[in-house]
Image: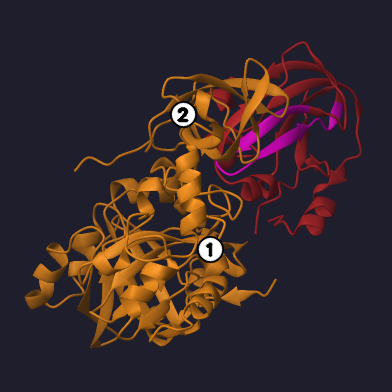
Chain colours: A orange, B red
Amino acid sequence: MTENYTALYEEHKKLGASFTDFGGWQMPLKYSSELAEHHAVRKSAGLFDLSHMGEVWVTGPQAAEFLDYALVGKISAMADGKAKYSLICQEDGGIIDDLIVYRRGAEKFLVVPNAGNAKVVAGALLERAAGFDVVVEDASASTSLIAVQGPLAEAILLRLVPAEQHELVTGLKYYAAVEVTFLMAGSGQDLLLARTGYTGEDGFEIFVSNESAAALWQAITAVAEEGELVPAGLASRDSLRLEAGMPLYGNELSREGNPFAAGLGPVVALSKEGDFVGKDALAALKADGAGSTTGRKLVGLKGLGRRAGRGHYPVLKDGAVVGEVTSGQPSPTLGYPVALAYVDVEFAEVGTALDIDLRGKTESFEVVALPFYKRQK
Amino acid sequence: MPKVAPELQYSDEHEWVSRGEGNSVSVGISEVATDALGDIVYVDLPEVGSTVTAGETCGEVESTKSVSDLYSPVTGEVTEINAAVVSDPALINNDPYGAGWLFKVAAESDGPLLSAEEYASKNGGDLS
């Protein structure tokens, strides 16, 4: 697999990061302790390099209509400035990727797929664009993405924004984005600031060119006071998103799965006008009761002991295999093991007692409602 | 670079051995191992009175990210376990060669052990 390095690689090295390969990218796994980074995001703030994520621009008179066709959500109904979580599916309803769409005008959208899928998604969008008056441009290679997540994120970022623009930031709603001027390296630069994240906390994601990524990273670090902000790696990002009950492509979502089993039925706009890729198959899956009366369903499991279930461990009911763990680890915030697992729908009810086979030993778990962790507003 | 305590011996599976009175040895895991594991959240140790065998698994160490088997570097009867690391596994990360020791064995024989120098050069450890 090609090794890609983000524009912030040298920053991570300076900070003493341990690296891991993720989706073909060398990414910081952690800087010191992944537990400390996790707690910092819950209590103060964490700084993440998400430059491995893709950025695909879709522009043109038929941009909204095209995305209604290419994705499962009703993108044309989005208000300008809003963000929307959506999926790109195959004809058979299998999930190619989950992604966020930002509306940046009547005829302009930014699609953000996952790192390992960026090229595939850009390719699928290009292919599906045939016959539409749109331009699909994959800007992933030239765009960096920096996230500041945690209760102090807003206060820290405001220090880089001119006073007259503060209301743009403080008034920014969750799942919305706005162009804001950031003061860095001695000058101002207009950047797209989104109030989105993958941690379950309040937080922001900032799109910036590769050339300016290090300057922005350093500027954010410089305005944070002692104890306010730590650089955070993918290990803590994974434990944070798991507590927040958010799916990870490759673990919970795949081409073999479907949105209904993954609990993402509401994301699929079967009633929207016109055809979209996967519509017939998804309508049939829904009619069959996929994820509700047939097949397996993604659930949250809370460990009653101390041992954690891990990806691919079997889920048991009275000794018989009824499911499989997709993600799991001890929850740093909650203090008990949590897991996401696909289980047969008859065992998916909240309160159901199940076991996980931990390398030959069984441990008791219970189906609980998702998310495991919800921040106090 | 992870530290390698110069006064100890090491197994290829990253356990360290410290000689005590008579045939008593203390066993722990090296900083090479704790660095690779990340924050340790659970440790499963052999029971006092049980017999461990060099090169065989005798417990598990679980971190936020993964689970690793614990291999005994020596053969003999377990005489004591470190209850402190069971209740606070972070001790293993914070002080792998001291407060983070795992268990003691009345050793009858050793498995293949490396000197600190050999272990450090093999694993890129820091002896100083």
Q: Residue furthest top?
A: B49
Going by the numbered disc 2, the residue's amino acid type is: Tyr
Please tell me the numbered disc located at residue A18.
none
Q: Which residues are magenta?
A: B58-74
Q: Which quarter shows the C terminus of chain A?
A: top left
Q: Position of residue B109 (x, y in %)?
A: 92, 26
* Eye-nearest disc, 1 or 2: 2
Horizontally, is B71 left or right of A109 in the view?
A: right
Are the residues under badges 1 and 2 in a single subunit? yes
Is disc 1 surrounded by few (<14), some (14 to 19) or many (20+) residues within 10 Å?
many
Residue B81 in the image: above or below residue A106: above
Horizontally, is A252 left or right of A110 in the view?
A: right
Is disc 2 surrounded by few (<14), some (14 to 19) or many (20+) residues within 10 Å?
some
Chain under callout 1? A
Which picture quadrant has residue A319? top right
Decide which of A333, A255 is in the foreground and name it. A255
Q: Position of residue A118 (x, y in %)?
A: 52, 71
Check disc 1 and report its element: helix, strand or loop: strand
Residue at left 33%, top 81%? A62
Query: Sequence-wise, which precedes: disc 1 or disc 2?
Result: 1
Which residue does the numbered mark 2 point to in the structure image? Answer: A336
Would residue B70 be counted in the magenta stretch?
yes
Q: Which quarter shows the N terminus of chain A?
A: bottom right
Residue at left 32%, top 46%? A42
Which residue does the numbered mark 1 point to in the structure image? Answer: A28
